[in-house]
């Protein structure tokens, strides 16, 4: 058996809200092997993003442990884990290449070296020629490509994506989904991808983890047995529909409560 | 030069030409606005008196500027960083801002006398609140998402300030400096006009009392020069700020 690259062991998370302690995640157990593309779906407010921020080291769980490569995560580990947010969150005064190079600047990598790395990543994400543009000169989809390049620039083993395409229009979302699969097949990262879109989850992932309504628990863990490379035609195949329906049953039930 | 730039030059030239020609043509009474050349001639003729008023004026502006911008921007950073402090302090500041503070000037002359202290006190109080409000707005507009992103990529607290918070708030700091400086200049000149023994505003008032309009406008030309100098310095600062942010 391949060793899990990311292991989430009996993790629970509670938040203090107005003096009361509200559970957000309860007893989550997940083992994610190296190179797997995992989508996390669930009803609104189920703690999907919280789960991601635990793996990112932005929070420490109330109980349980999160391991990356066997090492407990208690603080951000940017060289092992790259993060991509719903908004691109680029520094507006820096050019695309300087934004991509920013994580390396934090580690005091020399400017020439970090810019060379940034340019390679921009080429990988299809932005060659846009290196010196400022964020406001880029479209929403291009900004998110810059954010993906920034997430990849330190060559982390794990890529965390928190609804990265949610604020884009549908066409851009589909193009970027295919781009992400291409990048993933070239780099073989382990991806943890939070999304609201069942289509996106089934289309992109090897495996879809379904969380319940708050407090989030794992209610299903669906292996997506569609062949790779994925194609748009598969989204209208019977198997695609069956998988999507199985996930939808959980969420429909939860959203109705 | 671009067309816009040419247009600007033409506009300035038209204003100056109007200043010179409209009084000469008798369209504006010379007592209200004397021709530009007469104002400049008065400035040259009485240059000792005018230049002699500048050290006092600049000194008062400089001290008030330090109080207003130093205090206002620092306090703005503190208040802007806390939502609770903003809720508590901002309504009070906004209503205080609406008070025409010039009514306090006679009181300040009683407290601080006819010398520089009363000018500095008035200009500082006059400019402090708007400068503070500008600084607070700038800090409050900082996106917490950017700080969070930097943290996810391993930024230390010091790096978050150096690479994210500081560059993000520099434009609002420059905006606060610009507003604070402009208001301090107004405050000092007005205070000198209302009661002083020295300074540019005092000269303007004295010439006005004597109905010596060219003398009044000679003083106004100098005031315009001071605000112009302030603007030039700020544009330089803006350029170096932009360079720092991209470094």
Image (tube, coloured by chain):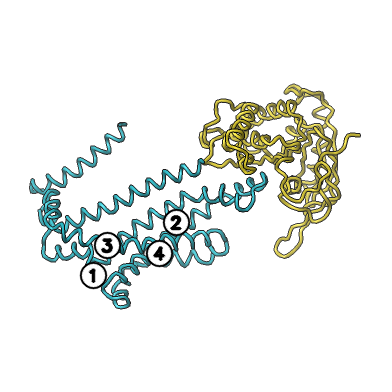
Q: Relative to residue B243, is residue B229 depicted above or below?
A: below
* Label drawn at residue B196: 1
**Chain letter, colour cyan:** B
Name the chain letter of the residue that bears numbered label 2.
Answer: B
Same chain letter for marks 3 and 1:
yes
Q: Relative to residue A146, is residue B67 depicted above or below?
A: below
The mark total stands at 4
**Residue A194 visible in the current orientation:** no
- At x 82%, y 34%, the residue is A34
Q: Which residue is mark 4?
A: B67
* Residue B20 percent location from the top left of the image: 13, 46
Q: Is residue B224 left or right of residue B181?
A: left
* Residue B226 percent location from the top left of the image: 27, 54
- At x 15%, y 56%, the residue is B47
Does label 1 or label 2 sit earlier along the sequence? 2
Residue lying at the far front of the rendered structure: A110
Does label 3 or label 1 sit earlier along the sequence? 3
Same chain letter for marks 2 and 3:
yes
The colour with which the image depicts chain A is: yellow
* Residue A157 percent location from the top left of the image: 76, 36
């Amino acid at each position: 058996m391949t060793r899990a690259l990311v292991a989430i062991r009996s993790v629970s998370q509670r938040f203090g809200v107005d003096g009361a302690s509200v559970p957000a995640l309860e007893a989550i157990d997940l083992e994610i092997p190296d190179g797997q593309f995992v989508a996390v779906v669930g009803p609104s407010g189920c703690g999907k993003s919280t789960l991601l921020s635990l793996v990112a080291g932005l929070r420490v769980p109330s109980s349980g442990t999160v391991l990356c490569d066997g090492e407990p995560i208690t603080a951000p580990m940017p060289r092992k884990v790259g993060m991509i947010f719903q908004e691109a969150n680029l520094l507006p005064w820096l050019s695309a290449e300087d934004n991509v190079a920013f994580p390396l600047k934090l580690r005091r990598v020399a400017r020439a070296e970090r810019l060379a790395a940034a340019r390679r990543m921009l080429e990988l994400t299809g932005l060659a020629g846009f290196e010196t543009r400022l964020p406001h000169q880029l479209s929403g989809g291009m900004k998110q490509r810059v954010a993906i390049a920034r997430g990849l620039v330190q060559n982390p083993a794990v890529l965390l994506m928190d609804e990265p395409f949610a604020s884009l229009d549908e066409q851009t979302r589909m193009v970027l989904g295919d781009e992400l699969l291409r990048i993933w097949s070239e780099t073989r990262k382990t991806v943890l991808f939070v999304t609201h879109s069942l289509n996106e989850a089934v289309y992109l992932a090897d495996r879809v983890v379904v969380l319940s309504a708050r407090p989030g628990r794992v209610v299903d863990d669906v292996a997506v047995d569609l062949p790779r490379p994925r194609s748009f035609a598969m989204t209208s195949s019977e198997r695609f529909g069956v998988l999507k329906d199985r996930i939808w049953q959980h969420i429909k039930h939860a959203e109705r409560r | 030069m671009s067309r816009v730039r040419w247009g600007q030059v033409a506009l300035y030239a038209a204003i100056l030409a109007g200043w010179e020609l409209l009084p000469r043509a008798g369209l504006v009474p010379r007592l209200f606005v004397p021709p530009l050349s007469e104002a400049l001639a008065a400035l040259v003729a009485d240059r000792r008196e005018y230049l002699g008023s500048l050290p006092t004026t600049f000194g008062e502006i400089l001290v008030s500027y330090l109080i207003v911008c130093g205090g206002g921007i620092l306090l703005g950073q503190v208040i802007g960083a806390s939502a609770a402090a903003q809720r508590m302090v901002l309504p009070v500041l906004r209503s205080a801002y609406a008070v025409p503070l010039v009514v306090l000037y006679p009181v300040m002359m009683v407290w601080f006398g006819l010398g520089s202290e009363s000018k500095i006190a008035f200009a500082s109080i006059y400019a402090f609140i708007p400068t503070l409000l500008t600084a607070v707005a700038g800090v409050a507009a900082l996106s917490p998402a950017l700080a969070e992103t930097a943290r996810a990529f391993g930024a230390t607290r010091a790096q978050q300030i150096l690479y994210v918070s500081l560059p993000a708030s520099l434009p609002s700091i420059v905006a606060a400096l610009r507003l604070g400086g402009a208001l301090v200049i107004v405050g000092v000149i007005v205070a000198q006009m209302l009661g002083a023994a020295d300074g540019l505003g005092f000269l303007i008032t004295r010439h006005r009392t004597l109905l010596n309009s060219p003398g009044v406008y000679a003083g106004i030309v100098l005031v315009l020069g001071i605000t112009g100098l302030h603007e030039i310095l700020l544009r330089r600062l803006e350029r170096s700020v932009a360079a720092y942010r991209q470094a």
